[in-house]
Image: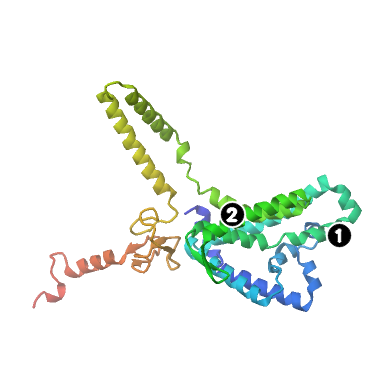
Amino acid sequence: MSWFEKKFSRYAIRNLSLVLILCYAFGYLIQIINPSFILYLTLNPYAILHGQIWRLFTWLIIPPEQTNLIFVLIMLLFYYSIGTSLERAWGTWRYNVYMFAGFLCTIAGAFLMMGYAYLFHAGMIERLGAAAFFAGVSPAFSTYYINMSIFLAYAATFPDAVVLLMFILPVKVKWLGIVYAVLLGVDFVQAAAAGQFYLCFAMLASLLNFLIFFLQKKNPAFLHPQEARRKARFRKAMSSGKGAAAGPAPESAAAAKAARSEQHAGETMRRKMAARHRCAICGRTELDDPTLEFRYCSKCDGTYEFCQDHLFTHVHAKGGMGPVPMTSVADSREDEKQGPSGQNPDNIGK
């Protein structure tokens, strides 16, 4: 756990998905009462630079556009479900960082779009007027693509989870994530071809948090110099063994065996490093048993993850002490009760 996480994890917002859905509910209420008022809440960088600072926050309450109330309720329930699942799997702090990274990237993308527009589309801005132009493109910067990044994160974290498509067809989430990624790429190309550069900025900015979080999970062990030397020795030993007419010499066979053992050890180490989940008690990962489920404990001080066998059978980490299994605590108390001579103090003198 990083220093930053230790310092500020206490301020993480629990159940952030519910908070966002409540913001959407308030936004839908505004649309019902006064639809035109929504235009004063969008992420408009031109208006923000002219004093309307509240737009840095109010764009979060603008809900995705839906005309059917039933579809709205289903959508909100679905995103609440996958959001809470991610928060339980990652922990409150990491989920907060993921979401707020998406918010900040979207805000930065809006201002970068403004700079791009002034550099390459100054004529259009002058013809339409800066206020009207940015008022028209600012609705593209919304939480729509951020919600899509939540879905992609869920598909990457739980690829084998099954959802009922149209409440009938069972489909694994990873396939839905792949289909969405392809459709998103098609939309990006079409927007670029049509000159709708603001949509391209909105897509890239809102999904940048997904790229940052999941590209950094790649294990760079294959770039390590020791790993390169092990592979070079293994290839050399194998080539020398194949080139011998009467079979490999004893020293070549020994070198090849040593190289294979080193490669196996390196592969084992890389697999452990690549594991996303690890139990704080038994040390098992999803690589040891794909059927294991892992959860974070909200009662422990710090971020500790436990497998299904130790989630409810550990003593919580408090006061700088890490979590320990309940059995070890029970055994130590039993030893104290027995006394130094191994006898129960209650039985002495009887």
Residue farthest toward the right in the current orientation of the protein: 127
Residue at 69%, 69% in the rendered image: 63
Name the side, left or right, on which 255 lies relative to 176: left
For mark 2, give the secondary structure: helix
User: Does residue 85 appear in the picture of this structure?
Assistant: yes
Residue beneath label 1, please? Answer: 132
Residue 44 picture quarter: bottom right
Name the side, left or right, on which 7 lies relative to 192: left
User: Does residue 14 appear in the picture of this structure?
Assistant: no
Tell me the tag on residue 312.
none
For mark 1, give the secondary structure: helix
Q: How is the image coloured?
A: rainbow
Of mark 1 and mark 2, the one earlier in the sequence is 1
Residue beneath label 2, please? Answer: 210
Residue 39 coordinates in the image, percent (x, y) = 79, 67
Residue 178 picture quarter: bottom right
Q: Amino acid at mark 1?
A: Ala
Residue farthest toward the top in the current orientation of the protein: 245
In the displayed structure, 160 sits above or below 33; it is above
Q: Residues within 10 Å of mark 1 (few under 14, many from 20)?
A: few
Residue 192 coordinates in the image, percent (x, y) = 74, 49
Residue 165 coordinates in the image, percent (x, y) = 56, 67
Residue 40 coordinates in the image, percent (x, y) = 79, 67
Name the side, left or right, on which 112 lies relative to 336: right
Residue 30 picture quarter: bottom right
